[in-house]
Image: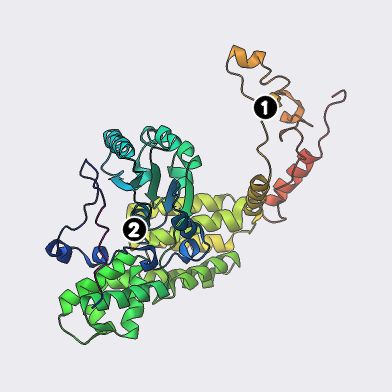
Amino acid sequence: MQESLLPMDDEVPHPSGAGVTPPKDGRTAAFAPLAERLRPRTIDEVVGQDHLLGPGQPLRATFASGQPHSMILWGPPGVGKTTLARLMAQAVDAEFLTMSAVLGGVKDIREAVERAQAAQARGRRSIVFVDEVHRFNKAQQDAFLPHVESGLFTFIGATTENPSFEVNAALLSRATVHVLRPMDESAMRALLVRARETMQGPALSDAATDRLIAYADGDARRVLNTYETLCSLLGKVAEIDEAALERSLGEQLRRYDKGGDQFYDTISALHKSVRGSDPDAALYWFVRMVDGGVDPRYIVRRLIRMASEDIGLADPRALRMALDAAETYERLGSPEGELTLAQTVIYLAMAPKSNAAYMAYKAARAWVSKDQSRPVPMHLRNAPTKLMKQLGHGEGYRYAHDEPGGVAAGEQYFPDGMTPQAFYQPVSRGLEIKIADRLAQLRGAKPPSGD
């Protein structure tokens, strides 16, 4: 029987009670969920995330250096964010101060600072770990900044949301973002082997293993705790087959059975059928997904994406229709709301196609990522105060509405010294035919004589 993988012994709970206190004896450990008992105690026991922990990869190098840096761990539930933070503290022998942004506030941050200062006085470094950091507001996130800058503690935040939108830019600039991926199939299989050895439980048939991995959807915690539940429900059986899995998890299993209907291939087929203007095939794949138990909210999010990526300005009504479909589904639910989604699928498939806006956005992103941070030209700067006006902000700006045709012909809107770019190239379909004509006029407009 494999030794249980318990949290490290020297983990320090947060004074507010939001911190995680490790099991203190065998009885407590025995009652802990399997996922907690199998939590890795060393970096070598971590399964998955090879792009971060493999040889020569960023986090592996950080562990090896013994010099942790402030970071944001971004990824879905059950992929090891908390585990990596704990192991980092263990690797560098640091106080591990943890709080949840769901329950914590500025008072908790203040108390963590005091504990870090006490640790520093004892000659020991600290790591402050904030789970669900995106739930802290701007002021709460700002409270970490001076202490991160002074080096009082290393900050590690965990989030399931895009930190570009949910984490304060000032805090984000002081932390490295590491993206954690859902656990892949090989990692999930390794976890199930470890779970069976620890539980001394029954084997899983190949079909049951596939179904359970699909149900877990890349979440290590879900696959481990579900296996533990199955062991409890089914008792001393030699093997768990697919039928037993179905009986034990029932409708819940079918609703999450993404692998059974080849989930990702199916959504790809739907997207490509819409892009290829085949409403019948698009409708077929849509119904396949609904019939397979896929959440229609996921489908409508993809439809909104299609409306922007593949139709864009060739028919701007497509985006509005997709958004209306999302709202209608929320009002009606299933099955009534699915009719609106089907209608939207057909409309998007029949709409004229253009990826010009999508390609323009990508081109602009590529340019900005490689270019320097150019200052805003003086004539385009805002001048709300007298001082700003004295400094020349807004001087020479031409108000387009006062110009012939409502266009300040020849005006420069790019940064000084930058060659004007033509990121947007409309196609000859739908409304973009007219947009292309208008754009040609604007790009060819000459400044007034004397300018």
x then y, percent, for residue 138? 40, 35
Residue labelled with disc 2: 83
- Residue furthest left in the image: 27
| Label annotation for residue 380 | 1
x then y, percent, for residue 43? 38, 63
Q: In the figure, 69 relative to 400: above or below? A: below
- Tell me how far mark 2 sits from mark 1, CA to CA: 48 Å
Residue at 33%, 63% in the rendered image: 335
**Mark 2: secondary structure:** helix
Nearest-to-viewer mark from 2 and 1: 2
Q: In the figure, 242 relative to 358: above or below? A: below
- Residue furthest bottom in the image: 238
**Residue 141 or residue 265, whichever sits in front:** 141
Taking the magenta stretch, the answer to whether it contains residue 66 is no
Residue at 67%, 51% in the rendered image: 363
Residue at 71%, 34% in the rendered image: 415
Q: What residue type is labelled 2?
A: Thr
Q: Which amino acid does label 1 sit on?
A: Leu
x then y, percent, for residue 239? 24, 86
Quadrant where the N terminus lies?
Answer: bottom left
Q: Can residue 257 be seen in this view?
A: no
Q: Is residue 111 visible?
A: yes
Quadrant where the C terminus lies?
Answer: top right
**Mark 1: secondary structure:** helix
Relative horizontal placement of residue 53, taking residue 32 as reference (left or right): right
- Region of the chain picked out in magenta, as a range: 3-10
How many numbered markers are drawn?
2
Q: Which secondary structure dominates the residues rendered in magenta? A: loop
Q: In the figure, 137 relative to 30: above or below? A: above
| Label annotation for residue 117 | none
User: First in sequence: mark 2 or mark 1?
Assistant: 2
